[in-house]
């Protein structure tokens, strides 16, 4: 009898080991939110960037290096958003399946308005998020075939939720989409293109690029010439330049949090991020 119990126990342990969910690491909150939706109750994906951290100023800490070294699957936007993480993945993530979502995730990629490089803020287009969910599901299913059906079902549910949110935002923004406005830096292009918004210009042209006197003068003229209704600050960025370019006809809108710096991480974050952006734009542009 003791031998039979040992066989049964060994079989159970072997099954549990074979069904182990992979250790998953993500770069920052919007990607972690999408991955968490696909993983559901099976596991918690780690996030390299701490809550409230700026992805453009990322510096690796020992605990983050350890997470990368232990990872079996890594999902990240790509080096355009966090170049320092790219170096770390190359050094520490050699054992992991690495998915660069800008290149391997599906969806589409745009260039910055000034033509200076790839715009990495692709998560702000819900069509890209839907494509990424498919890639995330397929990658996790390959790494963990025993839970493939769960990953696919969770991804399908997340896609449906994003499609419903997209329909709501389309209706919300339709009445104001022709009204021009100014953003703080050129990060809202994917969102603006998807919803047909009239983004007249950006105070900062690229990530972490402080505007010079010539750029501020250009935007000051653009605010007046375009008839910009609103100028939007951005979470995590110094709003001092807004006072130098705004005229008496344009309003200052609520700060836009395109990188989820102020949001609580988790599966609901992605929808909250898009909803907040759409609502803040509508609230400001719709005022008489």
Image (tube, grey):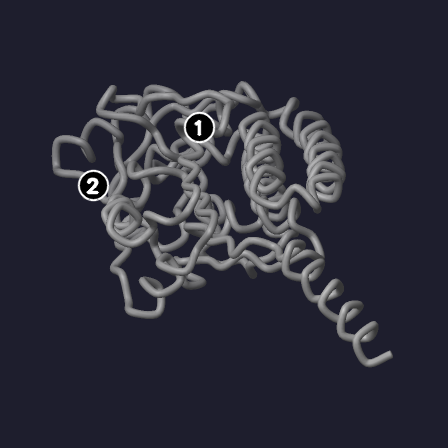
Front position among marks 2 and 1: 1
Q: Quadrant of residue 45?
A: bottom right
Dot 1: element: helix
Residue 247, given in percent of the width and then of the height, sits at 34, 36
Q: Are marks 2 and 1 in contact (CB under 8 Å)?
A: no
Q: Is residue 110 above or below residue 62?
A: above
Q: Quadrant of the N terminus?
A: bottom right
Frontmost residue, 97 versus 253: 97
Q: Quadrant of the C terminus?
A: top right
Q: Residue at x 28, y 48 (%)?
A: 56
Q: Which residue is mark 1?
A: 104
The single residue placed furthest to the bottom in the displayed view is 2
Q: Residue at x 40, y 35 (%)?
A: 100
Residue 234, given in percent of the width and then of the height, sits at 39, 47
Cα distance in 3D space between marks 2 and 1: 27 Å
Q: Is residue 57 above or below residue 65?
A: above
Q: Which residue is mark 2?
A: 209
Residue 255, given in percent of the width and then of the height, sits at 45, 49
**Residue 31 — which label?**
none
Q: Earlier in the sequence, mark 2 or mark 1?
A: 1
Q: Residue at x 75, y 33 (%)?
A: 160
| Residue 6 relative to residue 33: left or right | right
Residue 133, given in percent of the width and then of the height, sits at 60, 35
Frontmost residue, 167 versus 199: 167
| Residue 214 relative to residue 157: left or right | left
Q: Are there few (<14), some (14-19), or many (20+) residues within 10 Å of tag 1? A: few
Q: Quadrant of residue 80?
A: top left
Frontmost residue, 119 versus 69: 69
The single residue placed furthest to the left in the displayed view is 213
Q: Residue at x 28, y 44 (%)?
A: 86
Residue 65 in view in this figure? yes
């Amino acid at each position: 009898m003791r031998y039979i119990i040992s066989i049964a126990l060994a079989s159970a342990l072997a099954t549990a080991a074979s069904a182990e969910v992979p250790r998953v690491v993500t770069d920052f909150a919007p990607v972690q939110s999408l991955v968490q939706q696909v993983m559901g109750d099976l596991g918690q994906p780690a996030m390299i960037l701490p809550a409230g951290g700026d992805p453009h100023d990322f510096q690796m800490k020992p605990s983050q290096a350890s997470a990368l070294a232990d990872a079996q699957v890594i999902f990240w936007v790509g080096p355009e958003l966090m170049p320092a993480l790219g170096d770390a993945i190359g050094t520490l993530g050699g054992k992991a399946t690495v998915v660069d979502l800008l290149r391997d995730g599906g969806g589409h990629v745009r260039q910055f308005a000034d033509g200076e490089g790839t715009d990495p803020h692709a998560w702000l287009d819900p069509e890209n998020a839907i494509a990424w969910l498919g890639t995330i599901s397929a990658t996790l299913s390959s790494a963990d075939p025993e839970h493939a059906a769960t990953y696919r079902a969770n991804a399908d549910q997340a896609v449906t939720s994003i499609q419903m949110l997209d329909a709501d935002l389309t209706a919300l923004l339709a009445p104001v989409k022709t009204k021009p406005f100014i953003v703080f830096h050129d990060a809202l292009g994917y969102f603006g293109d998807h919803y047909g918004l009239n983004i007249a210009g950006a105070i900062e042209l690229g990530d972490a690029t402080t505007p010079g006197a010539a750029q501020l003068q250009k935007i000051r003229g653009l605010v007046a010439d375009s008839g910009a209704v609103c100028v939007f600050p951005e979470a995590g960025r110094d709003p001092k330049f807004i006072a130098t370019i705004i005229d008496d006809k344009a309003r200052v809108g609520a700060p836009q949090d395109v990188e989820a710096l102020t949001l609580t991480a988790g599966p609901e974050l992605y929808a909250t991020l898009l909803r907040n952006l759409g609502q803040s734009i509508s609230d400001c542009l719709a005022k008489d």
